[in-house]
Image (tube, rainbow, N blue to C red):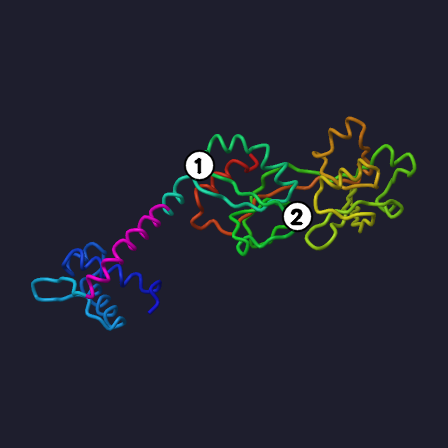
């Protein structure tokens, strides 16, 4: 007998035993008296035991039924408490939200609003894993993810959570003392380019100018899965790097990095928070979506 599949039968038996009446048990369970009687008979047949002694005037547990109720009652109470807690978390912004976010997405979207979110929803804990690799939300048991649009599966629900962003090409002043400044993306073949990994492959650098669009397989001395390391390598003069404009604007202003190919670096929609379904959405996830949503 599979106890999980027969939980309804066990609950029906416990209700009849508690009420000492099939009629009162049926009212409490919201079903017909005949349905309750059929359910209990089915349980007794599966167990090969008579659980309830029945007369025309009364119903009471047999010795076997009483022995079963001794452990069954507390177990059903615990299940009910667990269900009540689950319903409470569904209705109230509380509990844990598991997120998978690209490192730039976490830095640019989540961190700027984290203090506001924590103050508004003190009973929510954001459990954040950062990765630039594509992730199956359901298989990984994540509630949602933050990523740029092109990496989000089409069957996901996506909510925009950032303004337009740009990926720009930068190098250090020291680097350009010994290398010519590239004027077109084609000239990148003559430069060591610091790569960024997307999953198991290198991200191909994409450029656009007017009606022209180019995709370049940038080759160089290293391939990183962290844009901060790309920026650091560029600062150290290892080559040209591709970075989010927001992440390097201060370094450019300070003269520590030099931007090139500016007119080829077009903006794109940026980051989205994505999740599998709107059905029975937990209140904690709804609160996060409303906080991060681009207004």
Identify residue for label 2.
Answer: 132
Quick check: 5 above or below 117?
Answer: below
Compute the Cα span from label 1 to label 2.
28 Å
Residue at 23% of width from left, 58% of height from top?
70
**The magenta segment:** 64-85
Which residue is more in the foreground, 140 or 271?
A: 140
Q: Quadrant of the C terminus?
A: top right
Residue 84 part of the magenta-drawn span: yes
Quick check: 19 above or below 253?
Answer: below
- Measured from the top left, where is residue 186 in percent x and y? 86, 47
Q: Would you say 20 lies left or right of 226 here?
A: left
Q: What element carries label 2?
A: loop
Main secondary structure of the magenta stretch: helix
- Measured from the top left, where is residue 120 in percent x and y? 47, 31
Residue at 31% of width from left, 64% of height from top?
6
Identify residue for label 1.
Answer: 123
Q: In which quarter of the image is residue 106?
A: top right
Residue at 58% of width from left, 45% of height from top?
129
Q: Would you say 164 lies left or right of 186 here?
A: left
Residue at 23% of width from left, 59% of height from top?
69
- Measured from the top left, where is residue 277 in percent x and y? 49, 51
Which residue is more in the foreground, 52 or 145?
A: 52
Query: Badge 2, how many Cα within 10 Å: few under 14, some, many 20+?
Result: many
Q: What element carries label 1?
A: loop
Which residue is more in the foreground, 282 or 186?
A: 282
């Amino acid at each position: 007998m599979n106890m999980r599949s027969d939980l309804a039968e066990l609950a029906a038996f416990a209700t009849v035993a508690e009420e000492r009446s099939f009629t009162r048990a049926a009212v409490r369970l919201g079903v017909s008296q005949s349905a309750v009687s059929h359910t209990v008979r089915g349980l007794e047949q599966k167990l090969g035991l008579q659980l309830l002694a029945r007369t025309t005037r009364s119903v009471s547990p047999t010795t076997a039924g009483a022995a079963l109720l001794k452990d069954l009652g507390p177990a059903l109470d615990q299940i009910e408490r667990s269900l009540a807690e689950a319903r409470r978390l569904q209705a109230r912004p509380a509990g844990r939200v598991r997120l998978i976010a690209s490192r730039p997405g976490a830095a640019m979207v989540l961190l700027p609003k984290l203090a506001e979110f924590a103050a508004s929803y003190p009973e929510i804990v954001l459990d954040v894993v950062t990765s630039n690799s594509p992730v199956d939300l359901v298989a990984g048991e994540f509630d949602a993810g933050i990523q740029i649009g092109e990496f989000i599966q089409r069957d996901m629900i996506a909510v925009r959570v950032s303004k337009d962003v740009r990926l720009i090409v930068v190098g250090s002043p020291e680097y350009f003392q010994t290398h010519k400044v590239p004027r077109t993306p084609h000239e990148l073949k003559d430069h060591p380019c610091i790569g960024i990994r997307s999953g198991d492959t290198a991200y191909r650098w994409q450029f656009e100018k007017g009606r022209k669009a180019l995709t370049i397989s940038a080759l160089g001395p290293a391939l990183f899965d962290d844009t901060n390391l790309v920026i650091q390598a560029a600062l150290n003069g290892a080559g040209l790097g591709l970075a989010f404009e927001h992440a390097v604007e201060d370094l450019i202003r300070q003269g520590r990095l030099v931007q090139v190919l500016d007119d080829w670096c077009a903006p794109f929609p940026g980051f989205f928070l994505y999740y599998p379904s709107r059905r029975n959405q937990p209140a904690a996830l709804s609160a996060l979506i409303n906080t991060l949503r681009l207004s």
